[in-house]
Image: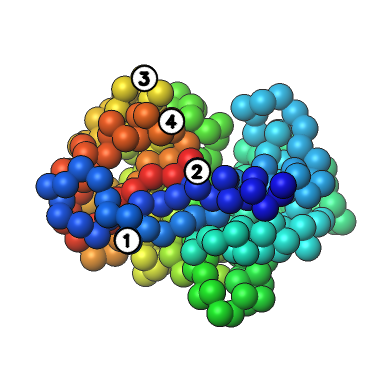
Amino acid sequence: SKTDELIASLERRRLAMACHDPATEMTEQADVMVLDGGMGHQLRALGVEISGPVGTMRRFLGVAMANLEQPQLVVDAHLAYIDAGADVVTTNSYACVPRCLQHSPDVGSGPIDLDTIIRRAGELAKEACAQRPGRKVKVAGCLPPLAESYRADRVGAFDENLAQYRRIAAAIKPTSDLLLCETMSTVDEACAACTAALETGLPVWVAWTLDENKPVLRSGESIEAAVAAVMQTPGAHGAVKALLFNCTSPEIVREAMPVLRAAAPADVLVGGYA
């Protein structure tokens, strides 16, 4: 059933937030936060068209445009995850980056405005949460990769990335409870996103995607180096609340989690999600 599929998706997105002795390998089950599932998959199931070669920015366009063209489906997707048990929903703005929107046809008087579509994603997430006031679900504003996911070789220069992340962070901040820098493939990419996120004053989570054969970033850089660089970002201490892994096989996440827990400050939560 669709309910069973949603629950399975939520289990894959389970975020094991550490509230335990850092010396222990695994998080206690009593303190677990659950993230929503992938918005692209859910929106496709609800009827949003997804086309283009797998792995290309063009393939994400329909998901991004749903914020403007099919907003009720975006709200419905968030609500489905909330009703299945999600404690946090992530804004449908993973694809709202210039390299994706450049594939969109002009609407009205000109091209799609990046700030408008990102703000709309945040508003729709907030609207869904407001429809379930008893759940007290938080909204995570997404700071995604600016090019193709999992491609460390496509990550741009730090200053260029920082400028784009500052724009994204400013647009998503008003509707977010925290900012999630996710699917980061390199040390510099995460630092650029984290720098922009920290400048908003909101709590920040950072999630890296790992190599599928060994517990290192997709770039080959070490987890220790990634954690150290993020925590050296101005304002990180006290504001970076969680360090995570995502879009990585469960086997590699399990192998990498003790490394992350050992490298992260004791007061920073750690976890993983699909």
Q: Residue at x 27, y 39 (%)?
A: 257
Count of numbered circles in the view: 4
The reply to whether callout 2 and callout 3 are in contact (CB within 8 Å) is no
Local crowd size for mark 2, using a 10 Å CA cut-off: few (<14), some (14–19), many (≥20): some
Residue 243 vs residue 166: left or right? left
The amino acid pointed to by label 3 is: Asn
Residue at the extreme bottom of the image, as rendered: 133
Q: Given this view, does label 3 or label 1 mark the residue nearer the observer? A: 1
The amino acid pointed to by label 2 is: Arg
The amino acid pointed to by label 1 is: Ala
Q: Which mark is residue 30?
A: 1
Residue 135 vs residue 47: left or right? left
- In this view, the residue in front, 37 or 101, is 37
The reply to whether callout 2 and callout 1 are in contact (CB within 8 Å) is no
Instruction: Report how far apart the C-alphas of labels 3 and 1 lie in the structure.
Output: 30 Å
Q: Earlier in the sequence, mark 2 or mark 3?
A: 2
In this rendering, the answer to whether 138 lies above or below 45 is below
- In this view, the residue in front, 231 or 171, is 231
Residue at the extreme top of the image, as rendered: 213
Q: Earlier in the sequence, mark 2 or mark 1?
A: 2
Q: Which residue is mark 3?
A: 213
Q: Which mark is residue 12?
A: 2
In this rendering, the answer to whether 133 lies above or below 194 is below
